[in-house]
Amino acid sequence: MGHDRPEVQALGDRATMFLRAAYDDLKDDRFDLAAFHSEQAVQLALKYILAKQLGHFPHTHSLIELFESVKSVRQDLYDFYRSKRYLVRGDE
């Protein structure tokens, strides 16, 4: 199922931009910004995967919800999340 709409590709492109920003932040000892940019990169990457595979994604900022959603298309990512879930702090 290839959903190659421009708005889907934009999610992947923005995920990459946020990841690059996180690397730059780490190099410059801006750890708070690195954490923020990393979280944004993960959110957008998960939304990209869901949009690419399913044609839609949940409109949420919750990493927990996004990882739960990605389980249906990328069990490996969900398993990784489950093994590292202590790193994902949620208000839920």
Image (tube, helix red, strand yellow):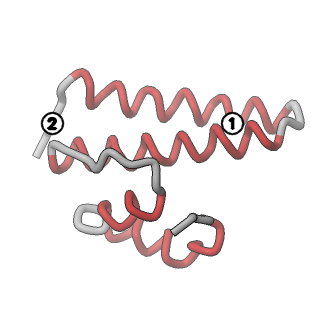
Q: Position of residue 90 (x, y in %)?
A: 57, 64
Q: Mark 2 highlights which residue?
A: 3
Q: Quadrant of residue 29?
A: top right
Q: 21 and 65: which one is in front?
A: 65
Q: 76 and 50: which one is in front?
A: 50
Q: Residue at x 78, y 33 (%)?
A: 25
Please state which amino acid type lies under the numbered disc 1: Ala
Q: Is residue 52 left or right of residue 37?
A: left
Q: Residue at x 13, y 40 (%)?
A: 2
Q: Mark 1 falls on what kind of element?
A: helix
Q: Mark 2 falls on what kind of element?
A: loop
Q: Position of residue 64 (x, y in %)?
A: 45, 64
Please state which amino acid type lies under the numbered disc 2: His
Rendered position, 32 above or below 20: below
Q: Residues within 10 Å of mark 1 (few under 14, many from 20)?
A: many
User: Which of the two labelled residues, at mark 2 and mark 1, occupies the earlier sequence position?
Assistant: 2
Q: Residue at x 58, y 47 (%)?
A: 39
Q: Residue at x 30, y 68 (%)?
A: 71
Q: Position of residue 35 (x, y in %)?
A: 70, 46
Q: Mark 1 highlights which residue?
A: 22
